[in-house]
Amino acid sequence: MARARLAQAKDQLARTTLYAPFDGVVTVRYKSEGEHVEKGEPVVRLVNINELEIQVRAPQDAVANLHKDEEMPVKDAHHTGKATLRTYVPVGDELSRLFELRLSFNQPDWMPGHAVRVSVPVSRPRQVTAVSEDALVIRQNNISVFRINSDNIAEYVAVKTGLTKNRMVEVIGDISPGDRIVIRGNERLRPGLPVIIQAQHNDGQ
């Protein structure tokens, strides 16, 4: 009986030593010395400060379009970078219905708890016809652009808009890639007016 109690005591003593799976910093302690802990119950929250990850929540429609190792833009108030999708939790939150994404990244200036914004694609990439947002002439009942034909005459083209990115706007209508579209002075332009094409400026416009 004494040997059995000794073995039991040694086993209990061995269970009081916790081994971390990696080097890190304890940010939260859930249990104090002397408390009883059930199997699987959290004791501390350990953060690996050498291999950081970004946790972000996204809607189901966005998750359906993602794949492993996909890169996504990440930024804070001062910097912009790229993060790679490592995995995601395939169970949505009961209240928000959002899914947690976990992204790997390498930004030594960002510490654990750093707030960032992640651009998550809501659809798969597709080719569209796009113009500068300055090309749009927005009226009360319609949106249009002015196209310059081969005779350097301004043509009125009604369009509908779609996706936007980096000041470029998807346009849907009688317009094709390669068309010459007016982006300056189009508010004063009228259909049928001749246009003189000037040399390209240093800003590319």
Image (cartoon, rainbow, N blue to C red):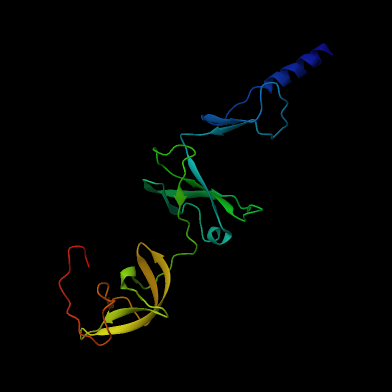
Residue 134 placement (x, y as % from top left): 31, 70
Quadrant assignment for the C terminus: bottom left
Residue at the extreme top of the image, as rendered:
2
Q: Residue 153 or 41: which is nearer the viewer?
A: 153
**Relative height, residue 116 to residue 166 (above, below):** above
Where is residue 170 shown, x and y percent of the image?
39, 71
Q: Is residue 8 above or below residue 77?
A: above
Q: Outermost residue toward the left?
A: 199
The spot of residue 93 in percent (x, y) is 63, 52
Quarter of image, res 180:
bottom left
Where is residue 201 shown, x and y percent of the image?
17, 66
Which residue is at a point 36% across and 79% down the rendered structure image?
A: 144
Task: Pick the residue in front: 1 or 15.
Answer: 15
Total residue callouts? 0
Q: Nearer the viewer, residue 175 or 132?
A: 132
Q: Residue at x 77, y 19 (%)?
A: 8
Quarter of the view holding residue 177: bottom left
Left or right position of 84 against 186: right
